[in-house]
Amino acid sequence: MTPDAIDPEAVAPSVANLETIVSLSKRRGFVFPSSEIYGGINAVWDYGPLGVELKNNVKRAWWRTMIQDRNDIVGLDAGILMHPQVWVTSGHVGSFSDPLVECAECRRRFRLDELPGTEHLSQTDLRDETVTSRLGLVCPFDAKPLSAPRRFNLMFTSHMGPVEDDGNVVYFRPETAQGSYVNFKNVQQSSRKKVPFGIAQIGKSFRNEISPGNFVFRMREFEQMEMQYFVRPEEGAAEAFEYWLPRRKAWYEAYGVTPSRLRFREHAPDELAHYAKKAIDVEYRFPFGWKELEGIHNRGDFDLGNHAKASGANLEYFDQASGEHFIPWIVETAAGADRAAFTFLIDSYREEIVRDETRVVLGLHPDLAPYKVAVLPLLKKRPEIVEMCHKLLADLKRDMMAVYDDTAAIGKLYRRQDEIGTPWCVTVDVDSLEDGAVTVRDRDTMTQERVPLEGVKRLIMDRMAAVRP
Ligand code: ATP
């Protein structure tokens, strides 16, 4: 369970250099820097044609596992802007902050706990005003002294309505969870759920991160996939925590992440967020080290208890079986859609030597792959072949993302699809005109099989169903 149990260097990342993924993403249309023609805006990224498919598929896979496959969890889509009191009550106005230090010379600002030499500092150290001078920490750019740390609140603010004054400040939500808490009664009563039950949400969150970076790992605008599980106090929460922890790690494995590149890391008592009684992260071995992929948190009755007090609403649950009234405790599974998509992208990347040439493959799980199938003509000059391709394509597109490409020779077309993770290619050739059969080629094994045209869609759908977790 402890991070020290695994030597970080003993498990190699899937790619040595993050640049490999950044350049593939740009070249093939997964991810672009936002507002690039104006020089970009730090820590915001845009998903291109393939990236939006991948991320949608990740969200769909999560929704399937967390809601569709279960009877005890329902979905919600709450607003990004909420009553400002929500963020006061939740503790975010008071304590959702990171330690910020500034260079006395160049004025650059850094998140203290991300500077070299701070790896083993406790949260108490990170709040200690003497820490930078005591440890002799200096600016990584010009080696000049750094200021004492101060707390920097990560919430973006704006003003609601036409007048800008302190009375109408609104916050861009930094987590989706609060939408589920303030709707607890609405959801519980309308869906007639009995504790234990969950509310799940996918949506944008915003954090004015001090030092964003590592591509889409840490952004200022990002998407979360969070589930709040409402349980009986204390033992109910301990039980739910033990239930969800292995399942959330197993979810990444089921969709193809290499198990040895995943681990758990428990938060030290002084590292716990203001709301948490216990927190364990699922971490992934990124090219830049072991980092959080998802957090499982026991939030106790902090949220519903405080919202009940501050709003005056009765947020107690009545348990008919025992006749008890209680404020449910909450166990949360908090994942990031961008961070998960990024992980699947990195972990599926491989380079192989095939006939003296390097073949780049994204071995994405078929449910996550942007295109499930590519339809390719062997000879694009034969109109009958092209016509057959388009008929097949139209039929496939009724049920899945499919694409046609005739802009290169077949070998090159296969490599292009391998590089974006398309699990199957279907090739129409001269013989197809005679025998009504086509060649289906598998991305991973590169084996080819001859299949009657009318059986192609069934074959692909059956193969997808067979590997679906
Ligand atoms: P960190 O310690 O990395 O700042 P956190 O502990 O504050 O993260 P949570 O509040 O637990 O993160 O958020 C839940 C999940 O949301 C994270 O595990 C991550 O997947 C995602 N997430 C959080 N912040 C960001 C961000 N700035 N960019 C992208 N994803 C994020």
Image (cartoon, helix red, strand yellow):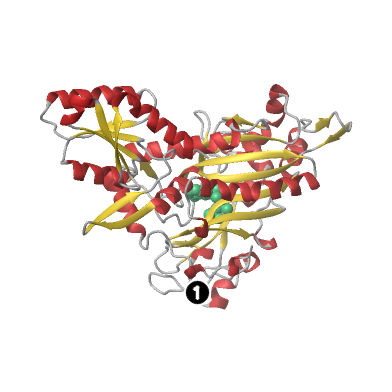
Q: Which residue is mark 1?
A: 137
Q: Can residue 208 be seen here?
A: no
For label 1, the crowd category at 10 Å Cα-Cα, with few meaning under 14, some 14 to 19 and many 20 or more, is some
Residue 110 appears left or right of 453 = right
Nearer the observer, 36 or 248:
248
Q: Could you tell whether 90 is left or right of 30 in the image?
A: right
Closest to the observer, 114 or 259? 259
Vertical position of residue 321 compared to residue 55: above or below: above
Please tell me which residue lies in front, 435 or 145: 435
Q: Where in the figure is residue 278, as x and y percent of width and height?
A: 70, 54
Query: Which residue is drawn at the image coordinates 49% and 43% (left, top)?
Result: 337
| Direction left: furthest residue | 381
Q: Residue furthest front?
A: 435
The reply, left or right, for residue 216 in relation to residue 389 is right
Residue 55, position as x, y percentages in the image:
43, 39
SS label for mark 1: loop
Q: Position of residue 169 (x, y in %)?
A: 56, 37
Quadrant of the snapshot with the N terminus: bottom right
Residue 141 visible from this viewpoint: yes
Q: Residue at x 66, y 49 (%)?
A: 297
Task: Kindly identify the residue that appears in the image at 51 percent across and 68 percent down.
Answer: 8
The three-letter code of the residue at mark 1 reads: Leu
**Coordinates of residue 300 in the picture (x, y in percent):** 74, 46
The one nearer the camera, 276 or 289, is 289
Q: Is residue 436 above or below residue 420?
A: above
